[in-house]
Amino acid sequence: MTKPKLILDVDTGSDDAVALALAMLGGEAELLGITTVNGNLELKLTTDNTLRVVDLCGMGDRVPVYPGCAYPLVSTLNPHSAQSLRPIPKREGSGTGQFGMHSDHLPLPATALAPQKTSAVVWMIETVMAAPPGTITIVALGPLTNLATAMRAQPGFAERLQRIVLMGGGDATGNETAAAEFNIWTDPEAAEILLQSGVPITMIPLDATHQAFLSAAQAEEIEAIGTPLARFVAALLRDRIAGYAKRDPEMAAKKIAPLHDALALCYALHPGCIRRSVEAVCHVDLGGGAAYGRTVLDRRANMVQEKPNCTFALEPDRAFFCDWLIGILRRAAKH
Ligand code: RIB
Ligand code: CA
């Protein structure tokens, strides 16, 4: 069976880093390339962090990294958008990134690997337009600026994609604000462009990722695998558990944290990891008020005027997800 052809679009970020490593070392996909975007951190840092993970996985000669958009299309609310009008707040936790969980630099050695000179948007367009229609899936793990820009710049780009699997959104919950999830909130207009594009989209929202948590005990189990990669993932997981403990008493009590982006990758490779989802009409609030960036699901049964434009994941198979993640780390240890 041919492996799925993937492009990973990331704002690395601790959970992006885990998803990248699993994609590169899991052997389950043909990773055509990685594109980076502003989000958790400014583009220079998300790109450098991505290169460090590629280096850790020994893939510097096989997986190219293309830097993308340094700013969202319109919004300047994310202080890591260099054009943002707001200073970068000192957030709790180790880093300056989202909720302090995304340090400027991942706990990895600096790398000599360099990004490609071609920009992510140009490379995405060239790659998708040169491929047979419907053969490339884009796994989007950060704000959707690169993808939206490619859709607007190249007629036929959206129609040629096989599908988009994106980590983002929330029905019953937000994280960056009471209403909005961080990836969508950083670039709401970009997310709405995707939802109007007609591309088959699966959203892996907070409603699902918060149920697919990993625990401190699993961090121990991962660390015991003993490889540099396993120790790295265990350290990131512990950092995230500490970060979430400051914001969520329930997660603090259970010593758990989600690895949002890894669940989105797991779905792209094993759709059965999502037990329940809904085919829904989803659009993004662009009003600029308290709900700016909220993903609004229209489930008014017979009142809905539109065809569903996304599959919205609601319930993961947590055991499958954790076994899959730890299994890849164990198998990678044997090579
Ligand atoms: O809200 C979680 C998402 O925002 C994840 O992709 C995380 O990496 C941040 O980008
Ligand atoms: Ca991310």
Image (spheres, rainbow, N blue to C red):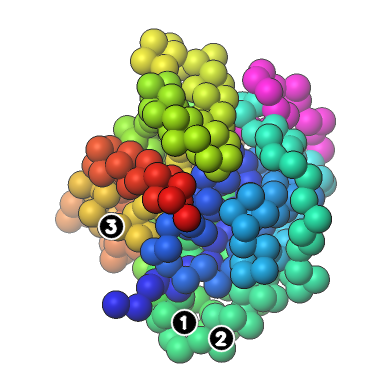
User: Which quarter of the figure has residue 14?
Assistant: top right
Of 25 and 163, nearer the camera is 25
Q: Residue at x 38, y 41 (%)?
A: 326
CA gap, disc 2 to disc 3?
26 Å
Amino acid marked by disc 3:
Pro
Q: Secondary structure at mark 3?
A: helix
Of 260 and 334, nearer the camera is 334
**Residue 211 in view in this figure:** yes
Q: Secondary structure at mark 1?
A: helix
Report crowding for label 1: few under 14, some 14 to 19, many 20 or more residues within 10 A (C-alpha).
some
Q: Is residue 268 left or right of residue 192?
A: left
| Residue 266 at x, y percent in the picture | 37, 52
Of 177 and 125, nearer the camera is 125
Location of mark 3 (residue): 271
Give the mark toward the camera: 2 or 3: 3
Is mark 2 in CB contact (under 8 Å) with mark 1? yes
Q: Is residue 29 left or right of residue 188?
A: left
Q: Residue furthest front?
A: 334
Q: Residue at x 82, y 46 (%)?
A: 83
Give the mark toward the camera: 1 or 3: 3
Q: Secondary structure at mark 2?
A: helix
| Residue 155 at x, y percent in the picture | 58, 83
Location of mark 2 (residue): 129
Q: Tell me if residue 93 is in the magenta stretch.
A: yes
Amino acid marked by disc 1:
Arg
Q: Which residues are magenta?
A: 85-98
**Eyeballing the image, is 172 above or below 144?**
above
Q: Is residue 330 left or right of residue 84?
A: left
Nearest to N terminus: mark 2 or mark 3:
2
Magenta part mainly helix, strand or loop? loop
